[in-house]
Amino acid sequence: MAARQGTAAGRIARRRLVVPRAEAGVATVLACVCAMALIVLTGLAAQMGAALLARHRAEVAADLGALAGAAAVVAEQRSACARAAEVVTANGGTVAGCSLEGADVLVTVTVAVHLGPLAGTATGRARAGPVAASVS
């Protein structure tokens, strides 16, 4: 059933939505801005994830290096720091510091963070040694 020209239904059917010229294309610009914001947030999340992973690797390498060094001290085989450095290097870290305090071995390890233009280092520290006998 076609609406007649002179009726109210015909006038409503012929009306078109008129967008002012000043607002034409705003949705495209807004979509581009939202897409760029999403890309930036994804990049930041990936960078933070890489930094967190590097920190965990540095802590694990420091823990294992300190334990290996403490075992060398107890066994009196060789230098505790040399043994700790071997274990740290095998776990992808670099020894930033190693010291002995009595029978305890303190190890500081750095691991490089590689992701995009924002590179850095993560640091892990650990201490290991024999447990003192408790007096009951």
Image (cartoon, rainbow, N blue to C red):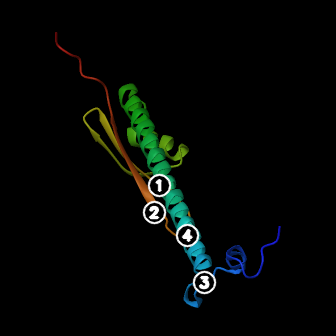
Task: From the top left corner, tell me how far across and down residue 106 is, in percent.
Answer: 32, 41
Dot 2 or dot 4: first in sequence order is: 4
Dot 3 or dot 1: first in sequence order is: 3
Q: Nearer the viewer, residue 51 or 73?
A: 51
Q: Amino acid at mark 2?
A: Gly
Asked if residue 57 lies left or right of residue 32, the reply is left
Report the Cα–Cα distance between label 4 and label 3. 22 Å
Q: Nearer the viewer, residue 88 or 113?
A: 113
Report the Cα–Cα distance between label 2 and label 4. 29 Å
Report the Cα–Cα distance between label 1 and label 2. 8 Å
Instruction: For marks 3 and 1, give the one nearer the viewer.
Output: 3
Q: Amino acid at mark 4?
A: Cys
Dot 3 or dot 2: first in sequence order is: 3
Dot 1 or dot 4: first in sequence order is: 4
Report the Cα–Cα distance between label 1 and label 4. 26 Å
Dot 1 or dot 2: first in sequence order is: 1
Q: Amino acid at mark 1?
A: Ala
Residue labelled with disc 4: 34
Name the residue located 17 percent from the left edge and 13 percent from the top edge.
135
Which numbered disc covers residue 51?
A: 1
Residue labelled with disc 2: 120
Residue labelled with disc 3: 19
Q: Nearer the viewer, residue 5 or 81?
A: 5
Q: Secondary structure at mark 1?
A: helix
Name the residue located 57 percent from the left edge and 80 percent from the top edge.
26
Q: Amino acid at mark 3?
A: Val
Q: Quadrant of the N terminus?
A: bottom right
